[in-house]
Image (cartoon, coloured by chain):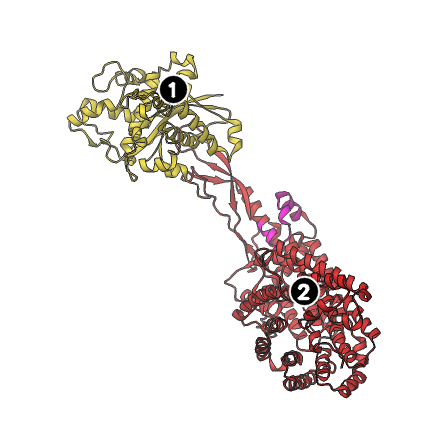
Chain colours: A yellow, B red
Amino acid sequence: MTIWLAVGDEAGNWDAIGKAEAAANDRRSLGVALVIAPIPAWKAALQAPFAYTTVEQHMQCCPVTGAKQAHHIKDTLDYLKDHHLQGRWQLDDPGPDPVKSSLCQSFHWLARHPHLITLGAHARLDQIRADLHHADDPAQALGKLYGLLAAFIFPFLPPGDELQIAPGLRSEPLVDNLALQRVDAARPGAATPDKRIDGDSRGMVSALKQIALERLHPWPDLQAETRLDAGILKYFSADWQAFLPYNALNAIADLAASLLSATQFPGYPIDIPNHTLPAGNVCFKSLDELLDTRPS
Amino acid sequence: MTWTVQLTLKPPVPASALRPARLPVEIAAPPPIFMIHAGQAPADDTDALRTALRTHGFDVRAEPPIPTPPAPWRTLDGTVDHGAHADAIGLAVARELRLVADREATPISLQRLHAAADLTTRVREAVGFALINLHLRWDRHTPLLGDWQGAVRRVLLERFQSFTKRRTEIPLLRQGFELLHAVAALRDRPAEPDAIRVAWEEYTAHHSAPLAYGLAFWAEATYRLSEVGLMDAARESLTRMENLGRELAAQLPGLDEDLVAGMWWHHRGRLAYYQGDFPRALDSFAAEWRLLDRLNGASRARLHRNTAGVLTDAGYLDLAEALTRQGLATQALNDEPEHFKTLGRLAEIQLRRGDLAGAAETYQRSWEQQADTQRSGQTLTYRGHVALLAGHPGTAREHYEAAEERDRRQNIHFNPYLCMGQAALALRGGEREELTTMAELYREDFQRLRGIQVLPRAVFHGALFLQDLLAAEDLRAEITLLLDEYYAIEALYLLNLAYPTPESATAPLERITSLLGDWQATVQRFRQRLPRIIPVDTPANGVTPEVLLPVLRECQRDNHWTPLLPLRARIYPMNLLGDGRRT
């Protein structure tokens, strides 16, 4: 039995989904990305050379400063703006800017990787509100979108294998946390609306599993042979920490979410047309495609 | 037909660790298109069914659909196991031909069928049945097949007498056109059991026809014989049909619903109705109603009319009228030859309701739609009844005389329905001598009448009784005959004439209440089975069991006929006798 690990991250501003002021036809894009591979493939991928270092080390450095910290694309957006590097990008022709060049190299590496599978799901905010936000809880909606993506890839795993999904942990505004809202309601004057707290991982994970299994329900044979689980990365296995540094994995998931944004989100500072991506293991799907319930 | 195939989907990305996914996917079978075989058989064709079809000059085309992957994999490439596809198509063809039943449509059934030693014979029977049942999809680009279907519709379903006959070298079609000719010819001559038998023997002397062709011939024979009231012969003919049906069903296990629907077993209901067995008639018709969507227009209209007939006789006039009008609408649309019969049914409903002007007009329309060569005295007789009930004896007499003339032209010398009208006319006019003459002239003819014709017999004898030409004891015998034929409502009319008190009529009253109770239950069951056709909450109307049973209980309780008397004027055709007072 092979364990497949899927690490995920969100794309777009998921806080907006819960805000009352979000318009009914809010066209902002939201999405999630998962990077999936068997554990040995992850290990090999991290140890592979990247520029003058390894992938593992590259993914633990700031793309702008090179300092040892998380490789987080969001941190580069101000740099790109200041240096007028926003707009249409061609990965095989990054130009002279070292930051842009490094990012292009990272995107190229991920898109072309023979063993890491990059999946993404995306939709307009209003559609996510209509189709996934029924619990009035962004964590639940996010979990559902991850679940749809998990169900999409699940049948293609070899029988007997196990897929463990670790969606990206997120923080959320205190006001979005339903449990704390109730506590606050009981303590008048204690509310601090601008404060951010850890998101509701439990709700997200359970929504992920529930919708994935629901979608696979018509094919019980698939689930009989292959297992699907979801949780928080550090709790899956303490052993992995030795060879799978979590911040490197999370950085790769962040890279995938950025690639999703760059190829699918109108108005994202980086614009990489999908058809210009090098052929590889990247597959992005719209929510319409994942939810399609027309009879075959 | 739907079946399940294994769809193999390519992974969305080429990563070597992923595997193609195998998903069972349900797809709809393409309807096979049957056609004339062009004559060239590919040498490598191993499909036993197609080979058998070609032996009889036919072929089939069935393209498998390419199944679409289900969501969310709709955009991925998928391939299907061709073996499973071929089996599914073979099964679709076998099911269409009724060679396997729906419930047994499995690859194993198909294998068994392919291996059957008598496959070629069974396929011949299947094609023979399909050619006259018209349930297959035939190739639209072959004029011969188009003409054949048109001819079957005209002759077997719509009962026209003419059709376009084509020359063909395909034995089943050649024999088929000859069969249609023989069936149409049955309508050209008087319906006599011997003549019909000879016609069939002549046909089979020249053609080794499939069983279904016999079924079609004897279906028409049953219809013709029952049309002219030869019920014993009609029942014999139906038995021949049923035997042929059983023989055919042994070869075509998927035949069940086809035989229930349409013209095939419709006669069961009709003959049960003519026997007065309303429960069996309505149950038979209810079985057909379930399959209404599969019936052609002519069969639907017939079902509407004949179901309405049962409901009319049981007094459910609103229901009967609604069904009759639906049947009329279908027939008018197609200008069907039996349109006049349904108009006759509507007129009778109007007559029973007391809408005599409406009935007169509808009978007139029915009369106008009949071909002059086919007109018997029947419709004119009914028009005479309407005039009599409307209090126009002169007009009634004119119609009866015209009916007599028509019957003579058709070689009909004794029409009991006409005689009963004439007797009622004489009674109402106080023409005792005329009645006495009629009694002498027709007594023996009437004495012989059985089956549905005990009704005009009872009216005739009622007229004699009311003119003091018949004893009460003989009238009681007529009541017994009526009840033997299940004419419960009509028998009520004579009851107070033959029996001084309800107590003295205990035995016939018990039979009547029992029959009325059965009908009430049957109609309720019919409504429940077919709520879409007949709303359950439609109120009963006319002289129904719902109306009569409480009245009869009251009569028995008070041992007096008074509560029944006002209803007698609504009991047709006994009410031709007027208020039922002895003169």
> Is label 1 on the same chain as label 2?
no
Asked which secondary structure carries label 1, the reply is: helix
Q: Amino acid at mark 1?
A: Trp
Q: Residue furthest left?
A: A83
Q: Are marks 1 and 2 in contact (CB under 8 Å)?
A: no
Picture mark count: 2
Residue A270 in the image: above or below residue B56: above
The residue that mark 1 highlights is A42
Q: Residue at x 15, y 29 (%)?
A: A84
Which dot marks residue B314?
A: 2
Q: Residue at x 77, y 66 (%)?
A: B483
Q: Residue at x 59, y 48 (%)?
A: B91
Query: Is residue B98 on the magenta stretch?
Result: yes
Horizontally, residue A141 falls left or right of residue B20, namely left
Residue A117, visible in the rendered structure: no
User: x%, y% of residue B561?
Assistant: 74, 68
Which of the two residues, B462 or A262, is positioned nearer the viewer here?
B462
Which of the two residues, B505 or B485, is positioned nearer the viewer here?
B505
User: x%, y% of residue B394?
Assistant: 64, 87
Magenta-drawn segment: B92-113
Label 1 – label 2 distance at C-alpha: 83 Å
Which dot marks residue B21?
A: none
- Of tags 1 and 2, which is closer to the observer? 2
